[in-house]
Amino acid sequence: MADQDVDVVIVGAGFSGLYLLHRMRELGVSTRVLEAADDVGGTWYWNRYPGARCDIPTTDYTLSFDPALETEWTWSEKYATQPEILRYAQFIATKYGLYSGIDFVTRVEQATWDDAAKRWQVRTDRGETITCKTYVMATGCLSVPKVPDIEGHDRFRGEVYFTSRWPHEGVDFTGKRVAVIGTGSSAIQSIPLIAAQAAQLTVFQRTPNFSIPAYNGPAHEERLARIAEDAATYRAEAKLSGGGVPGEPTTLSARAISEDERRARFEEMWAKGGLDMLGCFNDVLVSDEANEILCELIREKIRATVNDPETAESLCPKDHPFGTKRPCVDTNYYATYNLPHVRLVDLRKSPITTITETGIDTTAESLEFDAVVFATGFDAMTGAIVGVDITGREGRTLKDEWAHGPTTYLGVTTVGFPNLFMITGPGSPSVLSNMAVSIEQHVDWVTGAIAHLRDQGWATMEPTETAQQQWGVHVNDCANITLYPVANSWYMGANVPGKPRMFLPYVGGVGPYRLICDEVVEKGWLGFRISGPNGETCNDGKIRELMPDVGMVLQMMATLELPPIESMSADHAREFMAASSAMRPTGPAVGEIVDGTFPAADGSPLAYRLYRPASEGPHPVVVYFHGGGWVLGDHESDDPFCRDLCVRSNAVIISCNYRHAPEARFPAAVHDGMAALGWVADHAEELGGIPGRLAVAGWSAGANIAAVAAQLARDAGGPALVGQLLLTPVTDLGMGTQSYVDNGEGYVLTAALMRWFADHYIDEADRADPLASPLLADDLSGLPPATIITCQFDPLRDEGTAYARALAEAGNEVRHISARGHTHTSLTMVDMIISGAPHREQMGEALRGFFDAMVSR
Ligand SMILES: Cc1cc2nc3c(=O)[nH]c(=O)nc-3n(C[C@H](O)[C@H](O)[C@H](O)COP(=O)(O)OP(=O)(O)OC[C@H]3O[C@@H](n4cnc5c(N)ncnc54)[C@H](O)[C@@H]3O)c2cc1C
């Protein structure tokens, strides 16, 4: 029997719970908030250690739902202290009359879905049961302290403190010998202040973290001015930004600028201080090389600040790229180690063996203390959610469902748990963002969902497996194009023994995330099963199947509103393509590049560009044909891709031109392809190649030429080829496959553009000729081993797949690589489409494999 029945139960009275309660009241639904603490504030209630502050400027760490808040509350500092932020939470709770809706000192222990009643039963530690239609976990990402995994952690008989459960009356360390265990954000904020009081301070460090000076002071004048002038625009910009703070991302790449320019940029950012350092260069979080450049610049600052070289070296992080663990923002942290009574114990050199009744033993020494401070972090993102015993449909428990890592749709909902919402759950931007902005967005979205159910008379809402599975894939795809997964961070769950390793937050940015959530609603609650007394509705489907970087490039292109190529003349299209190519990254350095000519099938000279690896030759040789629909491009036009192939395959790549349409129509190009093969085979030695070790490769129309040339070479009895690498090949000019329907528009190579290419190249009547459509050849046997790459969002996907199948059926060795989330053009975009790198590696590996197999035969 329930003690109370309400529409909505919210767990937690931090900013999330407070704002949600306010929205529920506006909606007119009955709501209870249950909170373990005896006041509001969440994070800012619990974390009262000395020096506790936000690390996002407080002008931005602000709720914006009511314009009145912009004028009625003023922050005193750039990074406000915990007491001030707590007062802000209390101010909000008072202003909107929220205290009356909250049960304090009430911990939720259990929540069970009653499928017959379509309600949650929520049980508290007061023995009370509350039933509700909607159950919201506003329990915070960083609200469950991690139990220290140190032998004897509960043995110490002196004073023991946890930064995240600091005594409300404060602590006086005057004259005491203090140990601080941990060097994460809370430790780094508190150490200088503890050092100012203690007689002796010893810091035990397992892993050093990067910390950037805060240069705290009065609130940002420029930001205050912008907010005063037009708060709505300022906040709107934050909502569509990457991290929830307005600002233009830099275009400076650490790899592309000079040493002097890098230093100048770094010094400028160091002087600014704070987390803006994450945006020092545009490639910090995606390139090892760029990241290491920045790491070393920061390490130089540490070494220049800390007098003792050994301590300085111990404080220099070397085990993770900058930013992949949350960087800290400090006031005098590194300089504190210059004080005579402060000492760093590097646990990598001498680990703690045990905590004793009187102190701490390491492998090197026994130390005595009066007080031990644990700054050992949190069971982040999932700790508070699985901390409640939650049972959903058919008795499934959230703990079991998430045993191998959390699975969510949008980070807000999860399959099997109807009407359960999480604010800033795993799979949402949460801790990678200014959480004030993320919290407001989540709360607004959840409010929309609750209103929808109520207004339409629906009883339940739950994501589908398909939608949830794809969201997990998308979250991983985003993480995998960054360096984040490299670090053993709490973002990865790596700080909690036994916790599954996976990247927990959504790294795609708060702006893109917001647009996704809005799109889900616009598409009729895409990916949700919604049911009620009168039936069920489900617009099942997937959101964001494109690789994130591919999606970004497409979006950028869409904003340029470029004219379609098929609206241009061939010459104009060529100029247009050359101009676009001039703006792309150059690709990796190779050993040598040589330009030359060879005779076309009609004897006229055709250009080639040879890419030689840096390793000692001679090398195997790959004859490569560029893409461009037989109309566009030349021997240089796939330059970055050819460099990349050369480096990855350790083979000479010779990009051979061919005559283009409409000036030279079918079959000129394929005859030139054959001429190129013959000429390279005959001149292998003088080109630095190993005679007889020859493969053919191509992309798109170039792959069509490569495939046809492989068939012609077979029929002519040579040159002998050890393999063919076909990237998104044209194999059938019938152009009637399903992939033309699925992907005919919106993915750069459109169905209309393919028709334009084909019309320039070949008469309708000739299109079934195997020299144009190699898939239609009568005999596909006896061909060299093939690696064929098809892309999910390519009109040519199905014919590439069909060619791979047909070659295999004819008894050839075939490897078919299906590139999920990619388009016809994305895999060749070296250094732009990072998600294509694993496939580019597969292509290099395929070429190496052709040659290795030949040697072993
Ligand atoms: C030291 C520190 C500094 C931070 N600095 C920043 C910053 O600068 N910028 C930023 O964006 N973010 C920062 N964060 C993240 C911060 O957690 C969020 O910004 C925000 O305060 C979270 O609000 P919330 O309401 O979602 O969760 P919380 O504030 O964590 O509140 C959750 C509440 O739920 C309660 N609760 C949990 N489980 C139960 C249960 N079973 N029963 C009852 N009650 C329960 C908790 O007691 C808590 O009060 C910081 C976090 C920490 C720990």
Image (cartoon, grey):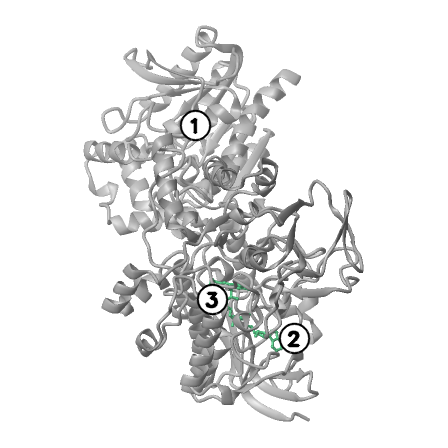
Figure quadrant, ligand 1: bottom right
Q: Tell me: residue 96, above or below residue 837.
A: below
Q: Is residue 534 left or right of residue 202?
A: left
From the image, which quarter does the C terminus lie in? top right
Label 2 CB-ligand 1 distance < 8 A: no
Q: Earlier in the sequence, mark 2 or mark 3?
A: 3
The numbered disc on residue 490 is: none
Disc 2/disc 1 C-alpha distance (Å): 52 Å
**Is mark 2 in CB contact (under 8 Å) with mark 3?**
no
Q: Secondary structure at mark 2?
A: loop
Q: Secondary structure at mark 3?
A: loop
Disc 2 or disc 1, which is closer to the eye? 1
Residues under labels 1 and 3: Cα distance? Answer: 47 Å
Residue 791: percent from the left, percent from the top? 46, 43
Calculate the distance from the C-alpha at mark 2 to the C-alpha at mark 3: 40 Å
Q: Residues within 10 Å of mark 1 (few under 14, many from 20)?
A: some
Kind of element beneath mark 1: loop
Amino acid, disc 2: Gly
Quadrant of the drawing holding the N terminus = bottom right
Asked if the beta carbon under badge 1 is closer than 8 A to the nearest atom of ligand 1, the reply is no
The location of residue 587, given as percent across then percent down, is: 40, 30
The kind of residue on which mark 3 rests is Thr
Q: How many labels, in total?
A: 3
Foreground tag (2 vs 3): 3
Mark 3 = which residue? 81
Q: Residue at x 43, y 77 (%)?
A: 448
Dot placed on the residue nearer the N-terminal end, 2 or 1? 2
User: Residue 588 — which label?
Assistant: 1
Is disc 2 surrounded by few (<14), some (14 to 19) or many (20+) residues within 10 Å?
A: many
